[in-house]
Image (tube, helix red, strand yellow):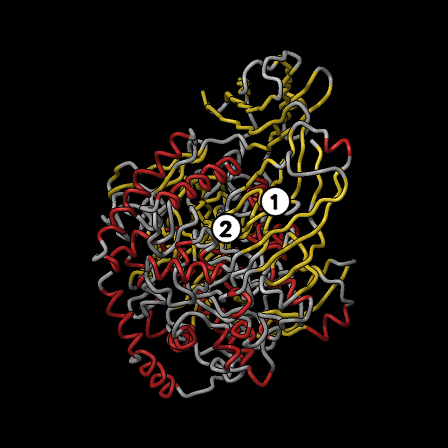
C-alpha cells in the first residue's frame, strides 16, 4: 500500500468567497478562522454567540497534490476520508467524484480514473449544516431543541454540535479524522476480524477472518500469512497459504491464555494484549498488511430473571462485575485539537480513579481508534451508544435509513475487535423521551421498529459477538419499565434536575445506573481562561454563558445550602460546589456498591467537558480533576470500606471487587473534633473474591445528641503489609452543621527531579483538605480528603517548578476555615426562593412521578 497523506495545509474559502484564508486538515472552519484572527476564541466570554454566522455559511477546502509515475500505475487508487463533516461534495481536478453525508462513516472513493501524473487538485465543498437542518426541519419538523438549533436528527453528525445542556452551539465543517489517497497493486485487505470462542477459560479458539480483494481473481500466486503474537511479542502461531477465496478463515487454539480483565480485578495497571497480523502477498512481495490487538476475554450481558426482577450485569470471564465509571462526551467542540497524549491522559485518569467502564454517549462521536486502544490497554470496558440522542430520528425515510445502515456497518467494522467493547446500545434516552411525543404515532412506531427490530437484525447479519441493548435507559421491552428498579438500566435525575435530597438515592435499588449526576464549577485556573476577575460571579454574563443547564447555577446554590454553606469568596464557592457534587455521587455509588448483585453498575454523568464550562464533569476541559474525580478514586476502590447507618446501628461494608480473596484489618475509631477517642475497634477480616463482608457497630441510644455535631468515625482498612486499602469518614450530621475547629495545616515539600512529596498535617480534624498549585493541571495523588488531627498524610505529584516556586503557588484550604457569606436564616430564604421558581416547581413535580 502507498499513500499520499493530505494532512496539512489547505486553502479555505467561504462558499460566497467573502473569506479566503489558510486552512488545515484534519481540522475545521472554526479553528482556521480563529488562527487567522477572523473570529476570536469562541470559548472566551460570550464569543460563542458572536460566531453564529460561521455555521450558516458553506465552506470549501482546496489544495494540490502530486501523483508520481509509480502511484499513477497502481491498480487501485482510492480517496479515503474518515470523519468528513458532513455534507461534502468532493471534486478532483474539477470532477465531482463523490459526496459524503455522514460524519461517522469511513468513506473510500475510487479515483483511479480521475487523477493524472503530476499536479492534481482536490476541493471539498462543505454545505452549511445549519442551513441544511433548518430546511429539513421545516419540511419534517422534529421536536424543538431547547439548547440550540432544532432539526439535528436530520444530519448524521454529532448531535451535541448543535448545542447541549453542557455544550455550546458550534457545529464545525471540516474533516475530523483523516483524509488521504491510498493505492494498491494487485490486491488489498479489506477487513480483519478476530472472533473468540471459549471452550474453557484455559482453552480458547481464535477464528481469524481476513477479507481480501484481488485484481486477478484466478491467479494463484496470491498468499495470505497470519501471525499471532502474545503480549511479550513472542510468536505463538504463523502460517502462510495460497489465497483461493476472498475470505480466509484461520483457526488458532490458545492454551492457558493470559486473560484480559477489567481494571481493578487484578493487581496490574495494564492488560495483556495479543496481536494478530495478516499479510497479503503476491509471490514474495507484500501487497498489503493489517493488524489488530486483541484481549482474550469473554463478555456477556446477563438479563436473566432473578429474585429482584431481571438482571442487568456484565459477566467478564465468567464473573459478574460491578461497573464503575462515567459517561464520555466529545473531548473538544473541535475534536482534532485533542492529541493522542491528551486522550491518554483522560483515559488514564479514569483508570487511576479506579474505573472499569466508560459509556460513550450517543450524542457525540464514535470515538477515535486511539480511544478504544487505550481502553483496551487500561482495562476499561466501553459501553458504546449508537449516535442517536434525545430526539426521534427519521428512519421512515429510506435514504436516511440506508445512510444509517452504512454508518452501522462502518463503525462495527472499525470497532469490533476491541477487547474493551462490551455493549452496543441503540441510543441515548430516545425511548424514555417518547412520552413527550406520544401524539406522534409515526415517530413512535419507527423508533420501536428501528431500535427493536431493524438495528439488531443488521447487527446479527454482521455476526457481532458484542451484546446489544435497545436504548439507555430501557426496561428491556419497548416503553415498559423505563427507569424501574427491577429491570434494565436507569438514568436517575431526581437528584439535581428533580431537586431531591441526596438520600433519595438510598431509596433506589436500580439494577444498573447508567446516568446520574451533579454539577459544579471547574477550577479557578479554568474559569480564568474564559472570564475576567470582575466577572467572577455565578450570575455574570460570561459565567451564565458557560452554564447551559437551565437554572443550573441556582441548583448549585440550592444544594450547597442543604449540605455545606455558601462561602464568601468566589474561589471558595468553586471549592464547595465541587464538594457538594462529589458528596452527591458518593452517596449514590456507596449505596449501590453495598447492594452489588442487585445493582451491577454506577456510571455517573459525566467524565469530561468539550469546553471550559460549569457542568457535571469530574475532570474539566483542560484535564483538571474536580473533587469528584478524587472521590471516585476512593469510592471506586477495588477494596472499599463504606457505612450505612440505621438509627444507632452502624453497618460497615467491606467490598472486594478483586478476582482473589483479600485479607485485611479494619480499624474503626469514634473521635471528637478535638481528637479524643471515644471508641476504638479492630477486626481482622478475610473477604472472598468479588464479595462483601459486613461489620456492625452499636452506638448508645442517646448517640445522636452527643455525637451529631462534634464526632466522626474514622475507618481504615489495611492489608497484611500495613498498606492502606481504603479510608473513609462518617458523620452523624450534614457537613454544614458540623462544629469544626479552625484548622492550622502545615505542608512540607520534598522534591526529587519532577517528583514531589508533600507531607500534610493539621492540628485538628480537618474536613476536605484541598490542595491547589496555581496553573497546575496534573492531579495530586490525593485531594479533598479528611485528615485526622496530628495525622501525617503524604501526597505526591509531578511538577517542574522548584521547591520555592511550589511553596509560593500552593494554596491549602479546608472546610473548617470557610466563612459563610450569609446567616443560616438568609440561606434558608434563598433556598426557598430557588425552590419556588416555576421551572423548579415543575421539575420537582415531574420527578415525583418519574
Ligand atoms: C442526560 C444525558 C444528556 C444530558 C444530561 C444532563 O440524560 O443523556 O443528554 O446532557 O442528562 O442533563
C-alpha separation, residue under disc 1 versus residue under disc 2: 30 Å
Which mark's residue is nearer the viewer, 1 or 2? 1
Q: Is residue 841 visible?
A: yes
What residue is shown at x 60% (from left), y 15% (from top)? 243
Look at the image and tell me in which quarter the N terminus lies.
top right
Does residue 638 appear to the left or right of 471 in the view shown?
right
Look at the image and tell me in which quarter the C terminus lies.
bottom left
In which image quadrant can residue 751 be found? bottom right
Q: Is residue 794 visible?
A: no
Nearer to me, 421 or 506? 421
Instruction: Provide residue 89's location: percent of width, then percent of height.
Output: 55, 49
Disc 1 packing (10 Å; few <14; some 14–19; many ≥20): few
Instruction: Provide residue 355's location: percent of width, then percent of height.
Output: 50, 49
Tell me which image quadrant ligand 1 sits in: bottom left
Where disc 2 sits, the SS reads loop
Residue 814, above or below 1: below
Residue highlighted by disc 1: 95
Tell me the number on the disc at residue 365.
2
Tally the marks: 2
Does residue 827 appear to the left or right of 725 in the view shown?
left
Amino acid at each position: 500500500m502507498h499513500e499520499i497523506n493530505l494532512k496539512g495545509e489547505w486553502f479555505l474559502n467561504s462558499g460566497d468567497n467573502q473569506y479566503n484564508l489558510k486552512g488545515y486538515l484534519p481540522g475545521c472552519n472554526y479553528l482556521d478562522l480563529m488562527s487567522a484572527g477572523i473570529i476570536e476564541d469562541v470559548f472566551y466570554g460570550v464569543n460563542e454567540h458572536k460566531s453564529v454566522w460561521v455555521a450558516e455559511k458553506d465552506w470549501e477546502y482546496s489544495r494540490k497534490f502530486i501523483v508520481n509515475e509509480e502511484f499513477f500505475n497502481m491498480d487501485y487508487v482510492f480517496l479515503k476520508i474518515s470523519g468528513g463533516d458532513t455534507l461534502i461534495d468532493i471534486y478532483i481536478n474539477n470532477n465531482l467524484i463523490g459526496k459524503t453525508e455522514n460524519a461517522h462513516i469511513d468513506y473510500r472513493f475510487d479515483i483511479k480514473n480521475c487523477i493524472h501524473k503530476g499536479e492534481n487538485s482536490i476541493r471539498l465543498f462543505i454545505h452549511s449544516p445549519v442551513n441544511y437542518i433548518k430546511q429539513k426541519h421545516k419540511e419534517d419538523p422534529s421536536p424543538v431543541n431547547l439548547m440550540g438549533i432544532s432539526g439535528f436528527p436530520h444530519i448524521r453528525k454529532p448531535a451535541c454540535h448543535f448545542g447541549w445542556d453542557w455544550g455550546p452551539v458550534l457545529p464545525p465543517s471540516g474533516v475530523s479524522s483523516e483524509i488521504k489517497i491510498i493505492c494498491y497493486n494487485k490486491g488489498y485487505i479489506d477487513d480483519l476480524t478476530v472472533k473468540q470462542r471459549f471452550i474453557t477459560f484455559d482453552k480458547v479458539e481464535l477464528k481469524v477472518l481476513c477479507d481480501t480483494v484481488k485484481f486477478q481473481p484466478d491467479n494463484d500466486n496470491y498468499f495470505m500469512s497470519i501471525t499471532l503474537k502474545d503480549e511479550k511479542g513472542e510468536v505463538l502461531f504463523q502460517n502462510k497459504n495460497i489465497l483461493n477465496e476472498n475470505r480466509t478463515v484461520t483457526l488458532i487454539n490458545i492454551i492457558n491464555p493470559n486473560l484480559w480483565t477489567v481494571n481493578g480485578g487484578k493487581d496490574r495497571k495494564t492488560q495483556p494484549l495479543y496481536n494478530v497480523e495478516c499479510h497479503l502477498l503476491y509471490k514474495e512481495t507484500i501487497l498489503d498488511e493489517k493488524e489488530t490487538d486483541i484481549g482474550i476475554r469473554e463478555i456477556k450481558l446477563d438479563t436473566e430473571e432473578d429474585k429482584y426482577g431481571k438482571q442487568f450485569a456484565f459477566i467478564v470471564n465468567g464473573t459478574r462485575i460491578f461497573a464503575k465509571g462515567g459517561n464520555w462526551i466529545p473531548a473538544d467542540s473541535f475534536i482534532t485539537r485533542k492529541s493522542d497524549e491528551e486522550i491518554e491522559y483522560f483515559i488514564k485518569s479514569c483508570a487511576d480513579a479506579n474505573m472499569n467502564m466508560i459509556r460513550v454517549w450517543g450524542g457525540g462521536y464514535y470515538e477515535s481508534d486511539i480511544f478504544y486502544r487505550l481502553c483496551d490497554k487500561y482495562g476499561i470496558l466501553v459501553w458504546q451508544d449508537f449516535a442517536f440522542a434525545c430526539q426521534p430520528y427519521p428512519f421512515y425515510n429510506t435514504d436516511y435509513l440506508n445512510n444509517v445502515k452504512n454508518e452501522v456497518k462502518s463503525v462495527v467494522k472499525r470497532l469490533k475487535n476491541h477487547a474493551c467493547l462490551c455493549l452496543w446500545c441503540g441510543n441515548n434516552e430516545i425511548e424514555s423521551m417518547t412520552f413527550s411525543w406520544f401524539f406522534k404515532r409515526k415517530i413512535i412506531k419507527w423508533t420501536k421498529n428501528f431500535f427493536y427490530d431493524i438495528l439488531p437484525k443488521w447487527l446479527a447479519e454482521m455476526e457481532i459477538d458484542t451484546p446489544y441493548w435497545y436504548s439507555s435507559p430501557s426496561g428491556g421491552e419497548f416503553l415498559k419499565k423505563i427507569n424501574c428498579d427491577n429491570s434494565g438500566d436507569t438514568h436517575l435525575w431526581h437528584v439535581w434536575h428533580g431537586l431531591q435530597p441526596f438520600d433519595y438515592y438510598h431509596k433506589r435499588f436500580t439494577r444498573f445506573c447508567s446516568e446520574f449526576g451533579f454539577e459544579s464549577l471547574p477550577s479557578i485556573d479554568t474559569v480564568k481562561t474564559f472570564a475576567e476577575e470582575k466577572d467572577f460571579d455565578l450570575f455574570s454574563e460570561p459565567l451564565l454563558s458557560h452554564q447551559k443547564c437551565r437554572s443550573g447555577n441556582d441548583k448549585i446554590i440550592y444544594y450547597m445550602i442543604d449540605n455545606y454553606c455558601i462561602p464568601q469568596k468566589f474561589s471558595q464557592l468553586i471549592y464547595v460546589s465541587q464538594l457538594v457534587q462529589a458528596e452527591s455521587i458518593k452517596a449514590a455509588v456507596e449505596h449501590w456498591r453495598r447492594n452489588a448483585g442487585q445493582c451491577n453498575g454506577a456510571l455517573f454523568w459525566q467524565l469530561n467537558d468539550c469546553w471550559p464550562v460549569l457542568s457535571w464533569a469530574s475532570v474539566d476541559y483542560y484535564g483538571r480533576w474536580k473533587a469528584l474525580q478524587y472521590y471516585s478514586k476512593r469510592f471506586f476502590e477495588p477494596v472499599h470500606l463504606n457505612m450505612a447507618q440505621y438509627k444507632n446501628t452502624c453497618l460497615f461494608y467491606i467490598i472486594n471487587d478483586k478476582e482473589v480473596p483479600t485479607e485485611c484489618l479494619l480499624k474503626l475509631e469514634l473521635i471528637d473534633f478535638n481528637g479524643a477517642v471515644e471508641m476504638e475497634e479492630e477486626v481482622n477480616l478475610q473477604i472472598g473474591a468479588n464479595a462483601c463482608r459486613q461489620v456492625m457497630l452499636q452506638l448508645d441510644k442517646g448517640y445522636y445528641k452527643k455525637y451529631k455535631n462534634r464526632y466522626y468515625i474514622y475507618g481504615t482498612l489495611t492489608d497484611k503489609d500495613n498498606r492502606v486499602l481504603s479510608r473513609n469518614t462518617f458523620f452523624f450530621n450534614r457537613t454544614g452543621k458540623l462544629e469544626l475547629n479552625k484548622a492550622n495545616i502545615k505542608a512540607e515539600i520534598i522534591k526529587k527531579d519532577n517528583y514531589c512529596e508533600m507531607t500534610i498535617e493539621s492540628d485538628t480534624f480537618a474536613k476536605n483538605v484541598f490542595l491547589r498549585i496555581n496553573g497546575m493541571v496534573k492531579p495530586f495523588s490525593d485531594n479533598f480528603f479528611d485528615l485526622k488531627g496530628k495525622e501525617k498524610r503524604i501526597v505526591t505529584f509531578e511538577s517542574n517548578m522548584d521547591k520555592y516556586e511550589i511553596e509560593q503557588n500552593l494554596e491549602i484550604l479546608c472546610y473548617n476555615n470557610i466563612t459563610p457569606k450569609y446567616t443560616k436564616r438568609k440561606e434558608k430564604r434563598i433556598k426557598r426562593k430557588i425552590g419556588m421558581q416555576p421551572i423548579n416547581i415543575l421539575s420537582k413535580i415531574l420527578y415525583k412521578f418519574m
